[in-house]
Amino acid sequence: NQHKNKNRGGRKKNDGKIQFDKKISTVKPKKKVAERVYSDKQSRQTLLKKRKERQKEQSGIIKKHEARIKELEKRLKEKGVIV
């Protein structure tokens, strides 16, 4: 256990036990991911662009699916399966 604690800011005393100068706080407030990773303006803008493109792509896919569903419903109505 001594070896574990050796590198944690404590100072060794003669009796072999470790004396800590101050309480070690391991919990630090987390920054928001965008703040942490994209602190400079340009990379933040590229991130926003990518996000917009992804949303556009998704909406396109959703529209295709909706059109397909309408088509299938129309066919089923023609066959008289659903009313």
Image (cartoon, rainbow, N blue to C red):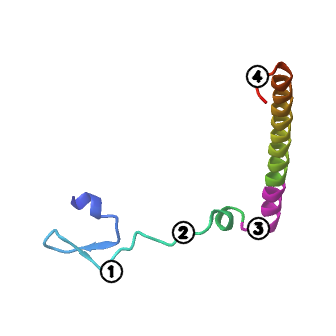
Q: Is residue 48 magenta?
A: yes
Residue behind mark 3: 40
Q: Is residue 13 magenta?
A: no
Disc 4 versus disc 2: nearer the observer: 4
Amino acid type, label 1? Lys
Circle 2: element type: loop
Circle 3: element type: loop
N-term-proximal mark, 3 vs 4: 3
Q: Is residue 31 left or right of residue 9?
A: right
Residue behind mark 2: 30
Magenta part, dominant SS = helix
Alpha carbon distance from label 3 to label 1: 35 Å
Amino acid type, label 2? Lys
Disc 1 versus disc 2: nearer the observer: 2
Q: Nearer the viewer, residue 10 or 40?
A: 40
Q: Kindly indicate whether the residue at mark 2 contacts the one at mark 1 (C-beta within 8 angstroms).
A: no
Amino acid type, label 3? Asp
